[in-house]
Image (cartoon, helix red, strand yellow):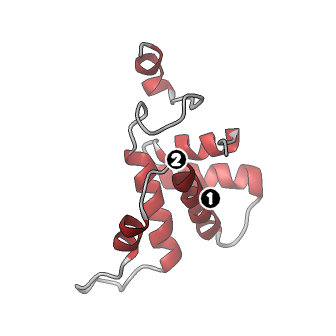
Amino acid sequence: MQLTKLDMLFIRACKVEDPEKRLLSVYRRFYGDYSNPKSHIGKILCRICEQLNLVTITKVMEGLAPTWFPIPGGEPPYEEKVFNYFTSVLRLTSVFEGLPKEFIPTARWRKRYENQ
């Protein structure tokens, strides 16, 4: 299955300075303004990571496991953890490795990408 242009926008949104703000903006633009978009964005990012084979089930389970030490303010909600986990997976994936050839990098990486 091939990634859509919308999937590419979500990948690019993960790689900016403030990914949460950009992901919410992309989501609102294409899906509307709903009360809990992070839950749906987490599912979208999960599907993208699965298509690109970026994570294994073991890594996902380890990343989403509850912490064993107390966190001030309590454990974050599950949807928040999923959103943050898959955002960081896509954010830390190299632009040159692991992403499909049709991926259009942000302007910051475009010159390097074209020289390859």
Residue 61 point in image, percent of width and height: 39, 73
Q: Which quadrant of the view contains residue 113?
A: top left
In this picture, is 18 found above or below 105?
Answer: below
Q: Residue furthest top?
A: 115
In this picture, is 30 found above or below 65?
Answer: above
User: Label 1's element?
Assistant: helix
**Which residue is disc 2 drawn over?**
52
Q: Which quadrant of the view contains residue 50?
A: bottom right
Distance between mark 2 and mark 1 Cα atoms: 13 Å
The answer to whether the residue labelled 2 contacts the one labelled 1, judged by CB atoms less than 8 Å apart, is no
Q: Which mark is residue 82?
A: none
Residue 81 point in image, percent of width and height: 45, 71
In this picture, is 84 found above or below 111?
Answer: below
Amino acid type of the residue that numbered disc 2 sits on in the rendered structure: Leu
Residue 95 point in image, percent of width and height: 43, 34
Toward the viewer: 49 or 75? 49
Toward the viewer: 88 or 48? 48
Amino acid type of the residue that numbered disc 1 sits on in the rendered structure: Ile
Q: On the rendered structure, is 98 left or right of 46?
A: left
Q: Which mark is residue 44?
A: 1
